[in-house]
Image: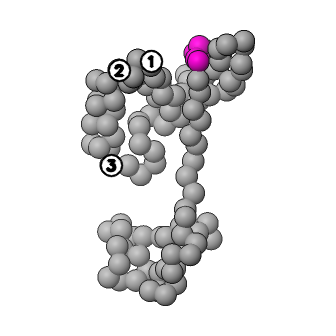
């Protein structure tokens, strides 16, 4: 990846977030690993501290509590997601939102409007 060593620390036991198809997650992990990225799954970040020209990231295993450290030049933090549904006009087609602004769907990914998935 352009000469950079990339380590991804992921709280979950798989890549891609909650709700991702596990086969897609496995393939995505495999592709990124082949490209030289490494993963620390089931791991949470405790702290990130700048020490001169580098950053020390303290980690802990979610299941085993095992502590570790990573030395980094750069840290990219990406946590959570939020819906961007305001102003889409969903109410004009009868799609209801939950209290968080998300579009609820059933097990077939059908919205509150029967012909919209």
Chief secondary structure of the magenta portion:
strand
Q: Position of residue 1 (x, y in %)?
A: 38, 24
2 and 1 marks in contact (CB < 8 Å):
yes
Residue marked by disc 2: 36
Using the numbered discs, state the Cα–Cα distance from disc 2 to disc 1 in whole angstroms: 7 Å
- Mark nearer the N terminus (3 vs 2): 3
Q: Earlier in the sequence, mark 2 or mark 1?
A: 1
- Say which residue appears at 34% left-offset and 73% top-offset: 117
Q: Please, is residue 59 above or below residue 24 in the view? A: above
Q: Position of residue 58 (x, y in %)?
A: 64, 19
Which of labels 1 and 3 is toward the front?
1
Extent of the magenta region: 68-73
Which residue is identified by label 1? 5
- Between 73 and 41, which is closer to the camera in this rendering? 73
Spatial distance from mark 1 to mark 3, Cα to Cα?
A: 27 Å
* Circle 1: element type: loop
User: Eyeballing the image, is 88 above or below 34?
Assistant: below
**Residue 43 showing in the rendered view:** yes
Residue holding disc 3: 21
Q: Residue at x 45, y 22 (%)?
A: 6
Q: How is the image coloured?
A: one colour
Q: Residue at x 69, y 25 (%)?
A: 47
Is 63 left, or right, of 56 in this rendering? left
């Amino acid at each position: 990846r352009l000469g950079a060593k990339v380590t991804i620390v992921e709280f979950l036991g798989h890549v891609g977030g909650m709700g991702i198809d596990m086969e897609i997650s496995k393939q995505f992990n495999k592709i990124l690993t082949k490209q030289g990225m490494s993963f620390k799954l089931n791991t949470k970040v405790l702290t990130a501290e700048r020490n001169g020209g580098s950053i020390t990231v303290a980690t802990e295993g979610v299941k085993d509590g095992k502590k570790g450290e990573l030395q980094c030049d750069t840290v990219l933090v990406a946590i959570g997601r939020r819906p961007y549904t305001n102003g889409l006009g969903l109410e004009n087609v009868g799609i209801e939102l939950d209290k968080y602004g998300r579009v609820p769907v059933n097990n077939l990914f059908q919205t509150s409007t029967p012909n919209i998935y």
